[in-house]
Amino acid sequence: MTISLRSILALVTFVTGSFALAPPVAGSTWEIDSAHTNAQFAVRHLLVSKVRGHLGRVTGTVHIDESDLTKSTAVATVDVTGIDTGNEDRDEHLRTADYLDTAKYPTLTFRSKAVERKGEDGFAVTGELTLHGVTREVVIEVEGATKPIQDPWGKARLGGVIRTTLSREEFAIGGQKVMDGGGLVMGDDVDVTIDIELTKTDD
């Protein structure tokens, strides 16, 4: 198994925040570099444009089982209280019980269950995503993974992009208000993109 394939899986088994894993018997452990990891989202507004924004801090750890990559595991949490669309009034509304209800549900959590290779250099990770008090099975796509590099401080690093689409209706987030001419005021699909950077922990 090449290093680059291991790198891709390290990214695939993630999704976004604070990972809690039991110490693995074998393999390597990688932590998310929160300062260089960014979770973004986009949702359709009035069928004519998209509102884009950022979620809060992403931290975590991924364990790679080099003997069997499909057994690699990760649990991730994203701080949704840090939602930022560039409009303070809108952000405050999104934090209320009308939408995310961050006072009650401050985080998004993902737990990986299965890994499948897709094409030359991509993977799909199936896992359980908990958001707004609702848990659903979702699939996360990973692409653009790189081979590990060593930074100026001697740390091994990986990087890549993770994408998935979530349904507001499935996670009971916000009303489905319909315009007079048809179509939702706010789209149901929320596209999530995470630019991720990982560092290998000390053995």
Image (cartoon, helix red, strand yellow):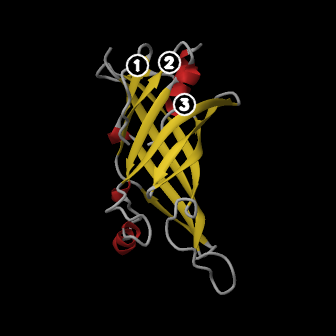
The numbered dot on residue 65 is 2
- For the N terminus, the image quarter is top right
Locate residue 161, reporting x and y percent: 53, 40
| Residue 30 percent across, percent down from the top left | 40, 26
| Upstream in sequence: badge 1 or badge 2 | 1
Q: Secondary structure at mark 2?
A: loop
Check whether the beta carbons of the residues at disc 1 and disc 2 lie within 8 A of each other: yes
CA distance separating discs 3 and 2: 17 Å
Q: Residues within 10 Å of mark 3 (few under 14, many from 20)?
A: many
From the image, state whether disc 1 or disc 2 is nearer to you: 1
As measured in the structure, the alpha-carbon distance from the residue carrying label 3 to the one carrying label 1 is: 23 Å
Amino acid of disc 3: Ala
Residue 74 appears at what percent x and percent y?
45, 32
Q: Amino acid at mark 1?
A: Pro
Residue at the far left: name it.
Answer: 153
Specify which label sits upstream in the sequence, 3 or 1: 1
Q: Nearer the viewer, residue 70 or 35?
A: 70
Does 120 sit above or below residue 48? above
Looking at the rendered image, the quarter that the C terminus falls into is top left
Camera-nearest residue between 194 and 101: 101
**Residue 24: which disc?**
1
Q: Mark 2 packing: few (<14 Cα in 10 Å), some, or many (20+)?
A: many
- In the image, residue 202 sits, relative to residue 96, either above or below, namely above
Q: Amino acid at mark 2?
A: Asp
Q: Which residue is identified by label 3? A: 145
